[in-house]
């Protein structure tokens, strides 16, 4: 875990009311446990699916080997689909998972961001199944 992520984790614990020294100790112990146990899952730095590659640490994106520059939300949406490849996900579920509770009825917001992704990649990178949701198909 890099220093910035460690600091963010400590800050979140402090914001939740935990004393700074206790928060620091908790984060450091957790990091030690994960470092010493090879069976525990490690965060995947690179996600790849079809022609898309994402560096989750540096927040960089490539389509067919060429770096693309999605907005912050487009990037989160692309990562969401890469973490759910081939799976049809309902519109409200996507909005909840990517934007949060206050946006579950903002269908047009989702359409605009998917359009932005399609403009930067290809029109069929994310597909819609009427009445069911969106998915990133396995075929190119």
Image: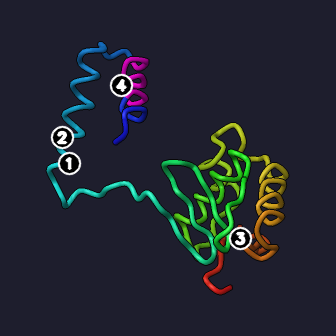
Task: Report the disc number at residue 32.
Answer: 2
Label 3 near label 4: C-beta < 8 Å?
A: no
Label 4 vs label 3, nearer the camera: 4
User: CA separation, marks 1 and 3?
Assistant: 41 Å
Q: Which residue is mark 4?
A: 10
- Magenta stretch: give its range: 7-16
Label 3 vs label 2, nearer the camera: 2
Q: Earlier in the sequence, mark 1 or mark 4?
A: 4
For mark 4, give the secondary structure: helix
User: CA separation, marks 4 and 2?
Assistant: 15 Å
User: CA separation, marks 4 and 3?
Assistant: 39 Å
Q: Which residue is mark 1?
A: 35
Name the chief secondary structure element in magenta.
helix
Q: Earlier in the sequence, mark 1 or mark 3?
A: 1
Label 1 vs label 3, nearer the camera: 1
Picture residue at 81% right of the left edge, 49% below the top: 109
Q: Could you tell whether 47 is left or right of 52 in the image?
A: left
Note whether 91 is above or below 1 in the view shown: below
Q: Work out which quarter of the rendered image holds the C terminus and state it.
A: bottom right
Q: Nearer the viewer, residue 9 or 58?
A: 58
């Amino acid at each position: 875990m890099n220093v910035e992520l460690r600091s963010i984790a400590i800050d979140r614990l402090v914001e939740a009311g935990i004393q700074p020294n206790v928060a620091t100790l908790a984060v450091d112990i957790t990091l030690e446990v994960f470092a010493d146990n090879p069976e525990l899952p490690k965060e995947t730095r690179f996600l790849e699916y079809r022609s898309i590659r994402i560096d989750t640490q540096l927040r960089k994106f490539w389509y067919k080997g060429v770096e693309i520059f999605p907005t912050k939300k487009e990037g989160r949406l692309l990562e969401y689909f890469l973490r759910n490849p081939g799976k049809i996900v309902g519109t409200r579920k996507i909005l909840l998972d990517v934007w949060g509770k206050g946006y579950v009825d903002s269908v047009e917001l989702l359409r605009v961001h998917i359009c932005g992704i399609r403009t930067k990649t290809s029109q069929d990178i994310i597909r819609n199944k009427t009445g069911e949701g969106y998915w990133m198909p396995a075929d190119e």
